[in-house]
Amino acid sequence: MADTMAMFERYKYAVYRLALSYTANPAEAEDICQTAFLRLLEREDTVSDDKAKSWLMTVTANLCKDYHKSFWVKNTQPLTEELTFHTPEQSEVFDAMMALKPKERACVYLYYYEGYSTGEVGMLLGISQTAVSTRLNRARKQMKRRLEEEWQ
Amino acid sequence: MKKIVQETWNQVELTGEAEERIRRALAQGNPISFPKRRIRLAVIAAVICVLALTTAAVAATIARISMDVRSVQVEESGDTYTVAFKPTDAEPINLGDWYPDALPEGLELKYVSSGESGMRLLYFSGEEEFFLFGYAKANEERTFQVQHVDSVEWLDVGNVKGCLFTRMGGEQFQDSAILLTPEKAVTKNHKGVRQQILFWTDEDRGIGFVLNYVGEGDYDLTAIARSVAETAEPLAYTFQIGAEAAVRKLGDYQPGWLPEGYSLSGEYGETCNPLMSPDWYGYVHRVYRNEDYYELHLYYEYIPKGEMSQVILNAQSCHPVLIGQIQGSVLEAGDGTALGIVWEQTDEFGIALTFTVCADDWSEEELLAFAQSVYCAQEANTDRFER
């Protein structure tokens, strides 16, 4: 059985970052993070500790998909959030990531940051391994193009 | 790319205010509305980064790895601790191959992980007990969590201090890396028995170690820890052993050409899959990777009649292509991007093998060049099939 509070301390950043990678909006990502852990709280009797992280990541991805389907998101512009980084390069990398499509951002985050394999990313996001590879390819190309332009 | 993506994401954290709000929401079981506001987390992140860099700079003069043990929760059922191995410099670390020589007799090495993730696990099983020995390089911070701890002791392990946790309980050792342990590592017998977990480091080499014992034996874990030494030969990991067995039966097909910067990063295979077929089922899967984590896959298998390939490419369309004299197919995504090339060829014994090559970010021409370079480096054993 998962202890939700302990799981929160352990996976809060992973969940938040995945939500942010999808939404590109810190405040919305916090909302989704909160909802994901509240869902875990409801099901902590049925989710074991060792499955909690993948469970949380899958729920978060689904919440993010719902978020993108919502009327509010489709008909409004995201808030302009100020995220500054340690170096200008990191800021540019973050901007380049945020310029990707939400599905591509999530793949980049899970693959490069969380270190999941393409197969595991596919399972978490409910898509095929090939779809993950395709999204990563597109993302890399786009980020490379954008960063080359900025760093020239 | 991986490094800069990681460095960037490392600076993105929930604000303290948001964390506190979620904790309160979890305590009361209801959501608490977040005001849609601007977040100044970067300022906090920057301060943390400066502090971390300062600490690392000081520590680097002493060791390449630090071990940070913290009590994070106090409960009636036992405290929860985290143990973090942290790098203290940016120099690349070689994981190496390590082995505990002084294990008790009667144990069998059941599983060795590949170490691709920067951590390797060795699982030794005996009657009513098991040892799980793991080691990780400190290039990336790695945190373990140990719950329901009864006691904590700091003991000498060579010239460093090791931290020994003792706990009772049936739960498997918790850690993000350990979760990758195969199910074999969870025995039926360890429920309710004593578990001891020893953490220590090799400061010069930048390696963190963990030795996890479940059972009723009275062993000196520090003595086993002191016996840990690098092996003369690289350790073969379990799937590699499976791949070697499959290679003997299927033959050894190698690429004659690899793009610059790519090298073999993993080799996987099995000799049988009883879930799919009572007959033996062999496959060889080789993964080549460059430093930017671009992957190239070569996969070949023998497919018994009526079975399906394990390789699933989500292709929307395909078109024929010639690989030398052999007819193959280029599989395409919905937007026309080439996903991979598949073909079938029959060896000298009349056995048909199916080949698949796929890669990240490659054109059809590049995939075809790779496919055409695949050659049989060694024929299969003639006695591989019971006919």
Image: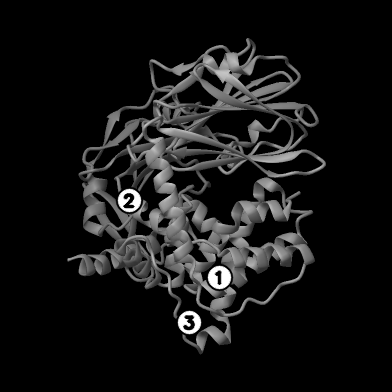
According to the picture, the residue beneath numbered tag 3 turns out to be: A78
Q: Residue furthest bottom?
A: A75
Q: Relative to B23, is B218 above or below? A: above
SS at circle 3: loop
- Tag 3, which chain? A
Judge depth for marks 2 and 1 and give the one in front: 1
According to the picture, the residue beneath numbered tag 1 turns out to be: A29
How far across and down, in percent of the image, does residue B262 sit? Answer: 27, 42
Q: CA distance from mark 2 to mark 1?
A: 29 Å
Q: CA distance from mark 3 to mark 1?
A: 12 Å
**Whether labels 3 and 1 share one chain:** yes
Q: Relative to A26, is B53 above or below? A: above
Q: Relative to B292, is B275 above or below? A: above
Front position in the image: A4 or B152:
B152
According to the picture, the residue beneath numbered tag 2 turns out to be: B294
SS at circle 1: helix
Name the amino acid type tagged 1.
Answer: Ala
Which of the 4 quarters of the picture holds residue A85? bottom left
- Residue B82 placement, left or right of B259: right
Judge depth for marks 2 and 3 and give the one in front: 3
Q: Image quadrant for the N terminus of chain B? A: bottom left
- Tag 1, which chain? A
Which of the 4 quarters of the picture holds residue B182? top right
Q: CA distance from mark 2 to mark 3?
A: 32 Å
Question: Which residue is painted at 27% across and 69% down in the image?
Answer: A146
Q: Is residue B311 visible?
A: yes
Name the amino acid type tagged 2.
Answer: Tyr
